[in-house]
Amino acid sequence: MAAGALLITALPTELSAIGFQDGVHFVGYRSETEITGIVRTYLADEAARRRIAAAGRELALREHTYDRRIEAFLSLIEVAREKRCAPARTWTQERVRLAYLEYFAANGHSSAPWRNCRKSRGVTWQRP
């Protein structure tokens, strides 16, 4: 679409979820038997083909560039930070180390839990 070609794709499509519309930015089909008729229609109607292709290209280049994706991604991270979607960020150092200890012990990492315990405040355990 960004190259300015008419996209003909199967429906339903995830393109609808990101702002593209069937018949406006691309042409969709529900059955493979429809493809030949759709292709013939748009080969015969150059104005419609160019209009839809141009609309798809414009939207793709305006809203769906790498930079826009990164902006959206960073925005989601900021929202998550503001809403404190990562509760461990508010834990004390001791609570974080206990979580590591539980994880390492549960997953059979033999030396990691002991290294972690020695780092914890007030813990003087030695490996058995």
Image (cartoon, rainbow, N blue to C red):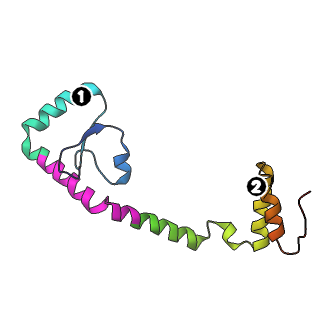
Label 2 crowd bin: few (<14), some (14–19), many (20+), radius 10 Å: some
The reply to whether the magenta stretch includes residue 68 is yes
For residue 36, above or below residue 69? above
Q: In this view, does 77 lie to the left or right of 112?
A: left
The residue at the point 28 percent across, 38 percent down is 9
Q: Which amino acid does label 2 sit on?
A: Tyr
Give the mark nearer the N terminus: 1 vs 2: 1
Query: Which x, y percent locates residue 23?
Result: 22, 45
Q: Where is residue 103 in the image (x, y as percent from the top left)?
A: 76, 55
Q: Give the range drawn in magenta.
A: 50-70
* Circles 1 and 2 in contact, beta carbons < 8 Å: no
Separation (CA) of disc 1 from disc 2: 54 Å
Tag shown at residue 34: 1
Q: Which residue is drawn at 46% across and 69% down?
A: 75
* Residue drawn at 75 percent across, 73 percent down: 93
Q: What element carries label 1?
A: helix
Give the x, y percent position of residue 114.
83, 61
| Mark drawn on residue 4 | none
Along the line of sight, the residue nearer the viewer: 125 or 54: 125
Q: Position of residue 62 (x, y in %)?
A: 26, 62
**Residue 102 vertical placement versus 108 (above, below):** below
Tag 1: Cα neighbours inside 10 Å, few (<14), some, or many (≥20)? Answer: few
**SS for callout 2:** helix
Please tell me the numbered disc located at residue 103.
2
Q: In this view, does 128 lie above or below 26?
A: below
